[in-house]
Amino acid sequence: MISKDLQNALNDQINAELWSAYLYLSMSLDAESKTLNGIARWFFVQWMEEQDHARIFQKYMSERGAKVELKPIATVPKEWKNPLEMFKDALDHEVEVTAMIYDLVKMAASEGDFTTLSRLQWFIDEQVEEEKSAADIVTELERAGKDYSTIRDIDATLGQREYKKAGPLA
Ligand SMILES: [Fe+2]
C-alpha cells in the first residue's frame, strides 16, 4: 500500500509533469510562430515525453491501488526573447524537477516504501539525461551568440529529434 502522504505527493508530481508538458508545448508554439521549426519540433517531442512521465506515475499508482487525482494545470509563460532564453528556462525547470524527484525519494525512503523507490530510480536516471540535453543546447546557443546562420544550423539539428516512448511504457 502507498501511504496517504506519498499518494498526495505522487499526485502533485503528476501535476508537475503535466505542467512541464504544457510548458514545453508553449515553447514549441512560440518557436513555431518564429519559424524556428527545428526547435519547435524538439519541444514538441519534449511535450510528448512529459506526458509519458505523468502516465508512468498514473500507471504505477493504479497498480498499487492508489487514487490518481488530476488537478488543474497552472498557466505557463507564452513567449521567450530568443532560443537561448527558452533553453535556459527549460534547464532551470529540469533542475527543479530533479529536486522534486529527490524529495519523493526521501519520502519513500523514510517510509521504507522500496517499491516506490524502485519506480523512482527510472526518474532519477532520466533527469540526468534531461538536464544534460538542455545544458548542452544552452552551451551551443551561447557559443552561437547572435550569429544567425549558426542558430539556423542548431535549429536544423534539433529538428531531427525523434519521439521514443518512455522505457516503462514501451
Ligand atoms: Fe518529466
Image (cartoon, helix red, strand yellow):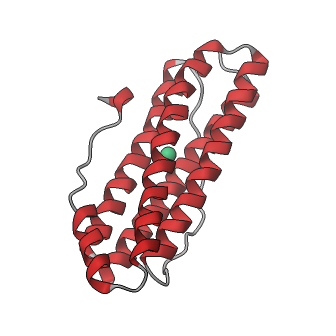
Location of the N terminus by quadrant is: top right
Q: Vertical placement of 5 versus 111: above or below?
A: below
Question: Residue at point 24% right, 63% down?
Answer: 157
Q: Vertical placement of 4 versus 18: above or below?
A: above
Left or right placement of residue 56 versus residue 65 in this view: left
Question: Residue at point 56% right, 27% down?
Answer: 120
In the rendered image, which quarter is residue 56 located in? top left
Question: Residue at point 64% right, 52% down?
Answer: 96
Q: Nearer the viewer, residue 23 or 147?
A: 147
Location of the C terminus by quadrant is: top left
Residue 125 at x, y percent in the picture: 50, 32
Left or right placement of residue 140 versus residue 4 in this view: left
In the rendered image, which quarter is residue 109 located in? top right
In the rendered image, which quarter is residue 107 located in? top right
Q: Nearer the viewer, residue 80 or 128?
A: 128
Tell me how many marks there are.
Answer: 0
Q: Vertical placement of 107 versus 143: above or below?
A: above
Residue 99 at x, y percent in the picture: 67, 44
Farthest right residue in view: 110
